[in-house]
Image (spheres, rainbow, N blue to C red):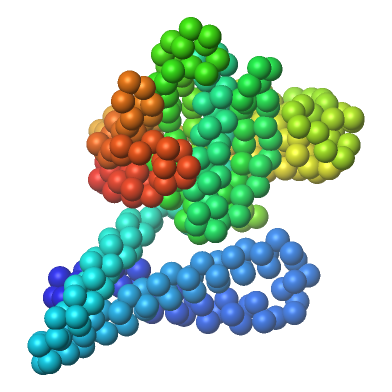
């Protein structure tokens, strides 16, 4: 109980609840102003921030109340020498330890863009049709993870492969601290299995790259010269819908100086697709700028930086079943569960690992 109370006090100090309460009061006042809704973009930023802050504060205050109640429960068990009450208290103690660990992980998300939503791009790499299938499996894994947590997602673009799977996809996970939570997923993911596309049932190794960047906000300033853009329109591919495959509404934008290519095909019109593609391009350029600034700081510190953005995790389905993170050592013997979105143990370990390597 003393350890729990001490840890909670540290968490509360790091999160600065007084400052958060002050900001919540200010945001509530802003959101109650009818004039705010004349600017939909600003209104959404305000309401999203308010909701995220209220959720954070409620979690900490709920844990604080549970810790206090648990002390009373233990006292009651001792006073009445009640084994059932003692068992109940021990179970609540175990549950509180887990929730406290989750709060500790949250305090590590203090980067400049950590509280933003996450924009994830997945590309199939080496491995042919198996790699394309693997890229689609990864997309489903992240969408299922978001679904488990109740986080909204939006798929901006999916380029389907000819035989099976996808060549690439870009989608947003609209979660509080989505970027800070998921940025450790950036890198190459390796799959080993018996290929369902090989009639000789041979083992196949496939690779897919995952790129994670923060969602841009209206306050971000990313300079983009229209003369440095090449814009192509084309007909959408893949599963059809109303007018999806019948008009040249899909848009591909190439930022010539950096070679960054983004595309969007899931909106109804060419103009909407272009606007969405520009948002994705801004996010990619913002992350590029952040990495360049970080590299400069590392050079000033004499730090060569980290190379975690290469191969980060192995998923082995044959001859044995395991998923192992190459950086943290986190491992699971249930790849089916992991591929169905049970990623939290890996994500928590990544956050701790990244924080320890960036200090």
Query: How many numbered circles does the render carry?
Result: 0
Furthest residue toward top: 200
- Which quadrant of the structure image shows residue 157? top right
Image point (55%, 52%), residue name: 147
Q: Give the side of residue 256 with respect to residue 111, left or right.
A: right
- Which quadrant of the structure image shows residue 170? top right
Image point (37%, 46%), residue name: 347
| Residue 237 percent coordinates (x, y) | 77, 27
- Above or below, comparing residue 144 to residue 62 in the picture: above
**Quarter placement of the N terminus:** bottom left
Q: Nearer the viewer, residue 291 or 83?
A: 83
Image point (82%, 25%), residue name: 234
- Which quadrant of the structure image shows residue 122? top right
| Residue 318 percent coordinates (x, y) | 36, 22
Image point (45%, 79%), residue name: 21
Q: Nearer the viewer, residue 53 or 227?
A: 53
- Above or below, comparing residue 127 to residue 11 in the picture: above
Q: Is residue 272 visible?
A: yes
| Residue 271 percent coordinates (x, y) | 84, 41
Q: Nearer the viewer, residue 66 or 24?
A: 66
Q: Is residue 257 visible?
A: no
- Above or below, comparing residue 203 to residue 249 in the picture: above
| Residue 43 percent coordinates (x, y) | 68, 68
Q: Give the side of residue 98 with respect to residue 342, left or right.
A: left
Furthest residue toward bottom: 79
- Above or below, comparing residue 259 to residue 39 in the picture: above
């Amino acid at each position: 109980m003393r350890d729990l109370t001490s840890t909670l006090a540290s968490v509360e100090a790091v999160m600065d609840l007084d400052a958060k309460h002050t900001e919540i009061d200010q945001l509530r006042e802003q959101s109650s102003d009818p004039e705010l809704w004349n600017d939909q973009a600003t209104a959404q930023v305000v309401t999203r921030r308010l909701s995220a802050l209220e959720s954070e504060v409620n979690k900490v205050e709920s844990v604080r109340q549970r810790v206090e109640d648990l002390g009373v429960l233990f006292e009651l068990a001792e006073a009445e020498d009640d084994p059932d009450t003692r068992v109940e208290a021990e179970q609540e103690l175990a549950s509180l330890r887990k929730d406290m660990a989750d709060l500790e992980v949250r305090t590590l998300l203090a980067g400049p863009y950590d509280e933003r939503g996450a924009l994830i791009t997945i590309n199939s790499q080496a491995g042919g049709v198996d790699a394309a299938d693997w890229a689609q499996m990864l997309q489903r894994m992240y969408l299922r993870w978001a679904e488990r947590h109740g986080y909204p997602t939006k798929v901006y673009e999916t380029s389907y492969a000819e035989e099976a799977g996808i060549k690439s996809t870009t989608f947003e996970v609209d979660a509080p601290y989505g970027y800070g939570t998921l940025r450790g997923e950036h890198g190459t993911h390796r799959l080993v299995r018996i290929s369902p596309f090989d009639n000789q049932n041979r083992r196949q190794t496939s690779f897919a790259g995952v790129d994670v960047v923060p969602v841009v906000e209206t306050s971000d300033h990313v300079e983009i010269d229209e003369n440095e853009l090449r814009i192509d329109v084309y007909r959408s591919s893949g599963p059809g819908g109303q007018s999806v495959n019948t008009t040249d509404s899909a848009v591909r934008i190439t930022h010539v100086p950096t070679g960054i290519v983004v595309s969007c095909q899931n909106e109804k019109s060419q103009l909407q697709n272009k606007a969405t593609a520009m948002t994705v391009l801004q996010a990619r350029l913002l992350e590029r700028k952040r990495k360049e600034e970080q590299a400069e700081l590392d050079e000033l510190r004499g730090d060569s930086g980290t190379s975690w953005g290469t191969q980060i995790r192995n998923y082995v389905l044959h001859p044995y079943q395991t998923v192992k993170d190459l950086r943290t050592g986190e491992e699971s013997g249930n790849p089916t569960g992991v591929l169905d979105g049970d990623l939290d143990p890996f994500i928590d370990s990544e956050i701790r690992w990244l924080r320890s390597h960036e200090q």
